[in-house]
Amino acid sequence: MNKNNTLVFITLAISFILSTLLKPYPFSWAVKMLPIFLLIAITWQHSKQLIVQQKPTSVRFFIFGLLLSSCGDFLLDYNQQDWFIFGLAAFFIAHLCYLISLKPFNNVYIADKKPLILITYIGFGVLMFMLFINGLGELFIPVLAYMVVLLLMALATVFSHRSNLWLVLGGISFVLSDSLIGFDKFNSAIVQNQLWVMATYYFAQFALVKGYLMSLKKI
């Protein structure tokens, strides 16, 4: 990912993040989706250039993950109150796609740190779920399933044979972003929550793309 693409992405992302202070406004969902569309285009362009011995299926699943993320962005921005469950489903499948694209796992370079990493991620997930649990109601099962697949995706960025710093940062940032959404929706309102949610979300997607493209060069 070159500097020009990075600069355009940052500009688009910041534009939407700041625009959350002005919402609601017409077609905000389109402004929200633009940074992800750019990441899809970048991934598609670079993957065609970098794939030599890669399995095309892996790249396709990663791009499907980005496409489903953009669908989730639309659903959650257009009508979050009524379409939250559909947006949750879109991101659930997106994380499954990311998981598949990161196979196989068992990163030997961090073998000695596996227990600590697992305990940290699982402990954080349990803590967050306990904070949400009283406000979940009918969404208990969907949110639990989503949190499990989100944590699996984040762990995959660590244990994948593709693992690198950018992928790991992307996984961590995605967990933080969704934790902010959950805390705000199911526990207590956070002041200007959309600013923090979107900042961590856009960074997560950017880091995942950057890390994944780096892994194509390495493997």
Image (cartoon, rainbow, N blue to C red):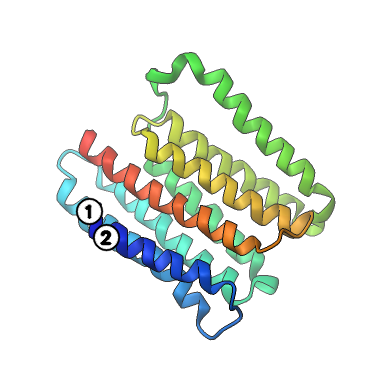
**Label 2 belongs to which residue?**
5
Task: Look at label 2 and name its amino acid.
Answer: Asn
Within 10 Å of the Cα at label 2, are there few (<14), some (14-19), or many (20+) other Cα atoms? few
Q: Which mark is residue 2?
A: 1
Q: Is residue 84 above or below residue 170?
A: below
Q: Is residue 112 above or below residue 23?
A: above
| Measured Cα–Cα span from mark 1 to mark 2 | 6 Å
Quadrant in which the C terminus is drawn: top left
From the top left corner, tell me how far across and down residue 12 is, in percent.
39, 68
Q: Could you tell me which residue is drawn at 77 percent across and 56 percent down?
A: 186
Q: Position of residue 179 (x, y in %)?
A: 65, 49
Quarter holding residue 213: top left
Residue 89 in view (yes/no): no
Question: Residue 102 versus residue 123: which sits nearer the camera?
Answer: 123
Q: Is residue 89 left or right of residue 7?
A: right
Residue 151 percent across, percent down from the top left:
57, 39
Instruction: Give the class, few, some or many, for how many residues have Cα within 10 Å of label 1's Cα (few <14, many ≥20).
Output: few
Q: Position of residue 43 (x, y in %)?
A: 28, 55
Q: Amino acid at mark 1?
A: Asn
Depth check: 21 or 182 in front? 21
Mark sitting on residue 124 = none
Q: Residue furthest right?
A: 134
Left or right: where does residue 20 sit relative to residue 32?
Answer: right
Residues tagged 1 and 2 counted as in contact (Cβ below 8 A):
yes
| Local secondary structure at mark 1 | loop
- Give SS at disc 2: helix
Residue beneath the point at 48% across and 13% down = 112
